[in-house]
Image (cartoon, helix red, strand yellow):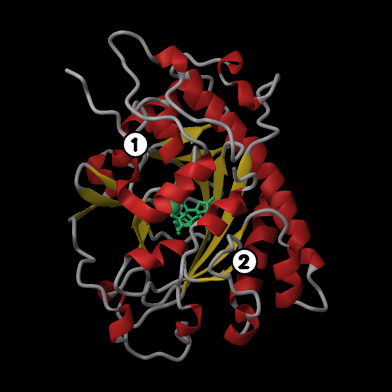
Amino acid sequence: MSSTLSDAFRTVPVHIRQNGQLDFESVREVPDSHTWQDVDDYPSVDAAAVGGVPVVDLNDPNAMKLVSDACETWGLFQVVNHGVPVSLLQDFDAQLKRLFSLPTERKLKAVRLPDDISGYGLVRISSFFPKLMWYEGFTIVGSPVEHARQLWPDDHTQFCDVIDEYQKEMKGLAGRIVWLALGGLGITKPDLEWAGPNGEFEEANAGLQLNSYPVCPDPNKTMGLANHTDSTIITIVYQNNESGLQLLKDGSWVMVPALDGALVVNVGDLLHILSNGKYPTVFHRAIVHQTRHRLSAAYLFGPPPNIQVGPLEKLIDHNNPPLYKSLTWNEYLETKTKHFNKTLGKLRIASTT
Ligand SMILES: C=C1C[C@]23C[C@@]1(O)CC[C@H]2[C@@]12CCC[C@@](C)(C(=O)O1)[C@H]2[C@@H]3C(=O)O
Ligand SMILES: O=C(O)CCC(=O)C(=O)O
Ligand SMILES: [Fe+2]
């Protein structure tokens, strides 16, 4: 049985030709390797036309209802008054810039290997698409030290310190938001044993995906990060004052506005399962810009790797049978590596009526 998240990727390696990396700085037109035919697969609508992407003030006495409603109807919302210090967000932003502005040869020293989970390169889901994305990423699961040393042989500690602090803050925030979401379904701390006696999610696991979307000569022809859902309970996204993240709502792409100081939260596949489909996972993607370089970072929050995750017992009764099979996060990630966007469907329990 796999015992860490990384084991899920040793079992199912993903082969991506990382050294095919484009020199985004010098390229003057989108090459065929990065030209996508289906950027307009769904129409795009203005967020205002569909009521605006919800913004939840976490200090609002109604925060639980607001989070719960947003999870149910949008699968994505922004949070303000989240308590993460502005100075930490600024330091984090500076480290993102510092990382992605390194020369490509230096970044490739920290490249992610096919059977590994962490490192620099194309996003894992690239193997499901015929074309490459206008994108560079860096995945951190566990300690960033080894890869940071390869990136900055003489000075890796400032990057590691900021990343550690950021992950600590995100863990606390993710725990708070998950309890608000679950509380809205009537779930209380004793209902989720693995969250620990005080519901502090001590044993929770997480990953950090740092994303860079370089400026692009023809943004309508290419894709930043292709349509996917996250295999998480929730994901918290930082974006650097540049919009680009879009969610699929009622058959249209809706842009999530860049809101100064806010963080974006989205429902992941495991919350979809835990809530027995009450909080649907959200399809999302990122587009790129002609003149503005966009940076973002996704904090991917999940359970301990070997805990069984299934529809919560309290939500199940004669009229509400479990809709999904239970499995561990590692098993989920392994299944996702094979079935990608069809994974939840594969886990759906067939109705007997
Ligand atoms: C914990 C994880 C979720 C993730 C796979 C990973 O092991 C680390 C990278 C994560 C990420 C980030 C970008 C989108 C995504 C679909 C991908 O390819 O890599 C997610 C993965 C996921 O949620 O399945
Ligand atoms: O760049 C973004 O805003 C989205 C990133 C994302 O979806 C991810 O890293 O999983
Ligand atoms: Fe995502």
**Tag 2 secondary structure:** helix
Q: In this figure, which residue is indicated by the disc labeled 1? A: 347
The quarter of the picture where the N terminus appears is top right
**Apparent side of residue 154 relative to residue 11 in the rendered image (left or right):** right
Above or below for 341 versus 305: below
Q: Residue 12: x percent and y percent? A: 48, 58
- Three-letter code, disc 1: Leu
Q: In this figure, which residue is indicated by the disc labeled 2? A: 96
Q: Residue at x 35, y 9 (%)?
A: 317
Asked whether the viewer can see residue 304, the reply is yes
Badge 2 density bin: few <14, some 14–19, many ≥20, Cα 10 Å: many
In the rendered image, the residue lying farthest to the front is 1
The quarter of the picture where the C terminus appears is top left
Pointers 2 and 1 in contact (C-beta within 8 Å): no
Q: Which mark is residue 87?
A: none
Report whether the residue tagged 2 is closer than 8 Å to ligand 2: no
